Image (cartoon, helix red, strand yellow):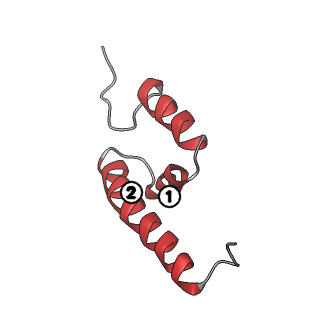
Amino acid sequence: MMGAFSLLHGLIVLGFAFVVCWPVARILRRLGFSGWWALLWIIPVVNLIALWVFAYGRWPRESPSA
């Protein structure tokens, strides 16, 4: 049987979150979004919804068409 989560499990999860969120935050900041949006990428279903929102939403750095 599996026991409770240990400190090692917590460190692995934090490491994974850092490895995923850091580059996503850098990309989002270059695109003109807040880097805090990167936290959505570690939530399983919300990350897919965020992907669609970014794909079809208005981008801050997009120049307005004349």
Tell which circle, 2 or 1, labels the residue nearer the N-terminal end: 2
Tag 2–tag 1 contact (CB < 8 Å): yes
> What residue does disc 1 label?
36
- Asked if residue 52 lies left or right of residue 65, the reply is right
* Figure quadrant of the N terminus: bottom right
- 38 lies above or below 13: above
Q: Residue furthest top?
A: 66
Q: Between 58 and 51, which is closer to the camera in this rendering?
A: 51
Density class for disc 2 (Cα within 10 Å; few <14, some 14-19, many ≥20) is: some
Residue 27 image position (x, y, % from top left): 31, 50
Residue 20 image position (x, y, % from top left): 39, 58
- Asked if residue 3 lies left or right of residue 47, the reply is right
Q: Quadrant of residue 59?
A: top left
Residue drawn at point x = 42 percent, y = 47 percent = 33
Residue 52: give its label: none
* Figure quadrant of the C terminus: top left
SS category of the residue bearing label 2: helix
- Three-letter residue code for mark 2: Ala
> What residue does disc 2 label?
25
Q: Between 55 and 31, which is closer to the camera in this rendering?
A: 55
Density class for disc 1 (Cα within 10 Å; few <14, some 14-19, many ≥20) is: few
Measure how far apart labels 2 and 1 are at the Cα level.
Answer: 7 Å
Q: Residue furthest bottom?
A: 7
- Asked if residue 57 lies left or right of residue 61, the reply is right
- 17 lies above or below 32: below
Residue drawn at point x = 44 percent, y = 28 percent = 58
- Three-letter residue code for mark 1: Trp
Residue drawn at point x = 57 percent, y = 86 percent = 7
- 29 lies above or below 47: below
Residue 39 image position (x, y, % from top left): 52, 57
